Amino acid sequence: MAELGGRPLIAYPLETLRAVLDDVAVVGKRDTELPPLPLNVHRWVEPAEPRHPVAGIVEALKRAGNRPVLVCAADMPFVTAATIRGLAAADPGDAPAVIATGNPLLGLYLPEAADRLTSRPDERRPLRELIAALEPRTVDVDEAELFNVNTLADLAAAQAQPNVKS
């Protein structure tokens, strides 16, 4: 619900995703407060437990059927359409995922990743560790695109960027 440049923070990655992908969904807990979503953006509710980012990835994979899912965190306002296109077209080889180096919340996950992620015994482990266990292929993404807003200081830093209008 945080605003960046007078728009909900989530509007930035949603706009980018909608420019590239035919199907876009926001995955979150039932109690996650969201601003009104654009037309044709689905809201998928993940289970109440575990309260871990991996739950959203697994829920998206389950809902997508036998299709890969492109995951992009809702707090990444500077990801570009070129990066999304590149990830969507990436060849994973034998890996169950292709992720941005340094951020597993920007990546392409194949259906087989769901079983491997749900079989992890300790969901208290950090997401990076759980995803690293998948041995994903990684692709370099400009660090500026991976900027995510977790604190008020991050929000202020994002607001100071020249491509954010007030």
Image (cartoon, rainbow, N blue to C red):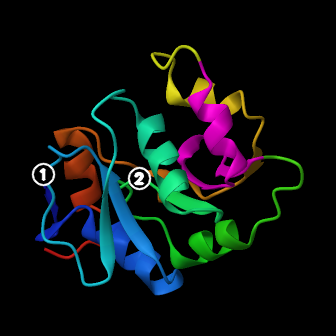
Q: Residue 128: x, y in percent?
A: 57, 30
* Residue 77, visible in the rendered structure: no
In this view, the mark in front (1 or 2) = 1
Q: Residue at x 82, y 46 (%)?
A: 95
* Residue 113, visible in the rendered structure: yes
* Quarter of the image with the C terminus in it: bottom left
Amino acid type of the residue that numbered disc 2 sits on in the rendered structure = Ala
Mark 1–mark 2 Cα distance, whole angstroms, equals: 15 Å
Above/below status of 17 relative to 130 = below
Q: Is residue 160 magenta?
A: no
- Tell me, yes or no, whether the two marked residues, 1 and 2, touch with CB atoms within 8 Å: no
In the image, taking residue 41 as reference, residue 103 lies left or right, namely: right
Above/below status of 165 relative to 70 = below
Q: Is residue 97 magenta?
A: yes
Q: Residue at x 30, y 47 (%)?
A: 149
In the image, taking residue 153 as reference, residue 141 lies left or right, namely: right
> Where does label 2 land, which residue?
73
Above/below status of 129 relative to 104 = above
What is the crowding at mark 2: few (fewer than 14 residues within 10 Å), some, or many (at least 20)?
many
> Where does label 1 land, which residue?
33
Which mark, residue 102?
none
Q: Residue 5: x, y in percent?
A: 16, 69
Q: Residue 52: x, y in percent?
A: 39, 30
In the image, taking residue 29 as reference, residue 86 lies left or right, namely: right
Q: Secondary structure at mark 1?
A: loop
Q: Residue at x 73, y 73 (%)?
A: 89
Q: Residue at x 51, y 44 (%)?
A: 58
Q: Secondary structure at mark 2?
A: loop
Front residue of 145 and 27: 27
Q: Residue 54: x, y in percent?
A: 48, 36
Q: Which residues are magenta?
A: 96-120
